[in-house]
Amino acid sequence: MELDDFIEFLEEEGIECYTAGKSLVIKSCPACGSEKFKVHLKIQRDDESKPFFGKCFKCDEGYSSIKYLLDAGVDSSAVFRIHGHDAEDALKKVASGEILKSGKKQGDSAPAEISVDTSSFRSFSVYPDHEATKYAERRGVDLIVHSDIVKIEPFANAVVFLCRDGENIVGYQKRFLYPEDPKFKTKSFKGFEKNKYVLEFPREGADILICEGPFTAVAAWRFGYYGICTWGAMVSNEQLEKIEQLAKKLNLSVGVAFDRDEAGQVGMDKIKRYFYWKGRKTFSVHPRDKSLNDLNDAYTSGKEIDKIEDERPFEAAIPTLAGWT
């Protein structure tokens, strides 16, 4: 596999990367959710038939270039094609266990079920005057309505968002009030496969509004929408399928409220392209004040937002030869 071809493929999928010495450095880690360019893949220059291998230097998750793309939600047939494999044959091998997504050899034992320890988390009602409780309320969290979704970790001085699959808690993300390093305000549960799940702030009868982060989804709820958080701008097909099923089940329209940056634009285009080909019109929501980055900025500053209907097909909805996801 040619390095330039792989980089071009990543860019078409909205995955930011750059080369540094013998490594390909990728912005987002599907395992821990870090978007600080912690994923490093060693560039194989001696054998272009091999995939690239490496890991995330934040959570230590191991990756091959195949595993990374699959975990990031990229269409599997496109993943195998870029690696020089016949897509149909490769998918059959995956199904039979000859090729495993995890990169483990056939016969390895299945990973143990991950248990999410929430024993250090507390409800707002237990610590109503705690700084983290006041912070969550100030950012828009309803201390009663959202008590099953949002908690605090008192001794870490953090707000915690719990992600569920049905009744089971599958992971969480902490937002520290005073992080040791300002670059790392959040921390997710190790092993939380964020690209497989969404966080919901339901509002009966309201249109769905897809947001990058938990607090932005909270603001969407405050502005009268059914807020959904995708844990970042790198949205997977699995997440989009879940949102499509929800929209169909509840007969709701779907909107997007991603950040005003390049990653947000790429993610928004992917979402709108997906729903365009599903025959579902979308809309966009942004702070009216263009100096504000997201809906939570608008909510906390008491500013208005604008809803913009997508009246016609847009450029992002047109498929390219590189892929249809």
Image (cartoon, grey):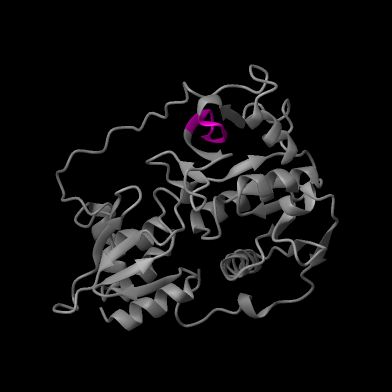
Magenta-drawn stretch, dominant element (helix, strand or loop): strand
Looking at the rendered image, the quarter that the N terminus falls into is bottom left
Query: With 315 as the anchor, is 178 left or right in this view?
Result: left
Query: With 57 as the anchor, is 273 left or right in this view?
Result: right
Q: Residue at x 86, y 56 (%)?
A: 304
Q: How many marks?
A: 0
Q: Residue at x 38, y 71 (%)?
A: 78
Q: Residue furthest top?
A: 126
Q: What is the x, y in percent for residue 296?
A: 72, 50
Vertical side of 18 occupied by 304: above or below: above
Q: What is the x, y in percent for residue 166?
A: 54, 32
Q: Residue at x 42, y 29 (%)?
A: 116
Q: Quadrant of residue 67?
A: bottom left
Vertical side of 206 occupied by 15: above or below: below
Nearest the camera: 276 or 226? Answer: 226
Q: What is the x, y in percent for residue 222?
A: 79, 43
Nearest the camera: 46 or 317? Answer: 46
Q: Is residue 303 magenta?
A: no
Q: Residue at x 65, y 61 (%)?
A: 259
Nearest the camera: 166 or 21? Answer: 21
Nearest the camera: 199 or 99? Answer: 199
Vertical side of 48 occupied by 309: above or below: above
Q: Is residue 157 magenta?
A: yes
Query: With 42 as the anchor, is 311 left or right in this view?
Result: right
Task: Provide the residue span drawn in magenta.
Answer: 156-169
Q: Quadrant of residue 148?
A: top right
Q: What is the x, y in percent for residue 2?
A: 27, 82
